[in-house]
Amino acid sequence: MKAVRYLDIGLVVVTAPVLVLAGAPALGIAVGAVAWILQRFAAVALEARARRVENVRVAVGLNLFSQFGRAWLVGLAILLVGQLSSHDDGLAAALLVLVAFTVYLATTLAMRAIGGSSAAV
């Protein structure tokens, strides 16, 4: 079941080089992949920290910071690559993140439906 939790990361790692070889904008794919992987590792670390905290308010604050901070990280990465490089790079980064998020959401919902952890994965 651990492998299913990180299916989105595996998908990004495997498909990013294939997309670049197929002609997708390399910078956009790289930025999207790095942003997605960084935010997922940040999520795991922050959620683990929130589970260890005894104060409920601190735990809720960490989880809120995790959710909003990760969204801003990915959003700003896409925006910056689109503005500083080309719009095609921004589009490639956005599409890669969209697909990764869709896989992440589907696996999270499936894990919860079959009795996995109620905490975010």
Image: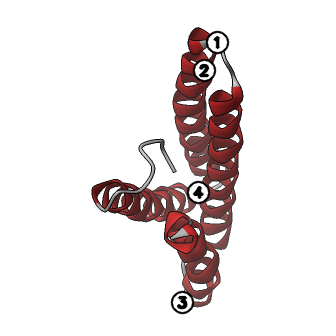
Q: Tell which of 117 and 99 is nearer to you.
A: 117
Q: Are marks 4 and 3 in contact (CB under 8 Å)?
A: no
The residues bearing labels 4 and 2 have C-alpha atoms spaced at a distance of 39 Å
The residue at which mark 2 appears reads as: 59
* Residue 109 placement (x, y as % from top left): 32, 55
Q: Nearer the viewer, mark 4 or mark 2?
A: 2
The residue that appears at 71% across and 32% down in the rendered structure is: 49
Give the distance between the C-alpha atoms of the residues marked 2 and 3, in whole angstroms. Answer: 43 Å
Tag 1–tag 2 contact (CB < 8 Å): yes
Seen from the viewer's position, the closer of residues 41 and 57 is 57
Counting other residues with Cα less than 10 Å from the Cα at mark 3, is it few (<14), some (14-19), or many (20 or more)? few
Q: Position of residue 78 (x, y in %)?
A: 56, 48
x 65%, y 46%: residue = 44
**Residue 51 in the image: above or below residue 60:** below
Residue 121 place in picture, x, y as percent = 52, 51
Q: Which circle, 1 or 3, is nearer the viewer?
A: 1
Name the residue rendered at 67%, 17% in the picture: 54
Residue under pointer 4: 86
Q: Amino acid at mark 4?
A: Ser
Q: Earlier in the sequence, mark 4 or mark 2?
A: 2
Q: Which residue is mark 1?
A: 55
Say if 112 sits above or below 50 in the image: below
Q: Residue 10 lies in what quarter of the image? A: bottom right
Q: Look at 59% across and 24% down and name the residue there.
A: 65
The numbered disc on residue 22 is: 3
Quadrant for residue 30, please give it.
bottom right
Which secondary structure, mark 3? loop
Label 1: few (<14), some (14–19) or many (≥20) C-alpha neighbours in 10 Å: few
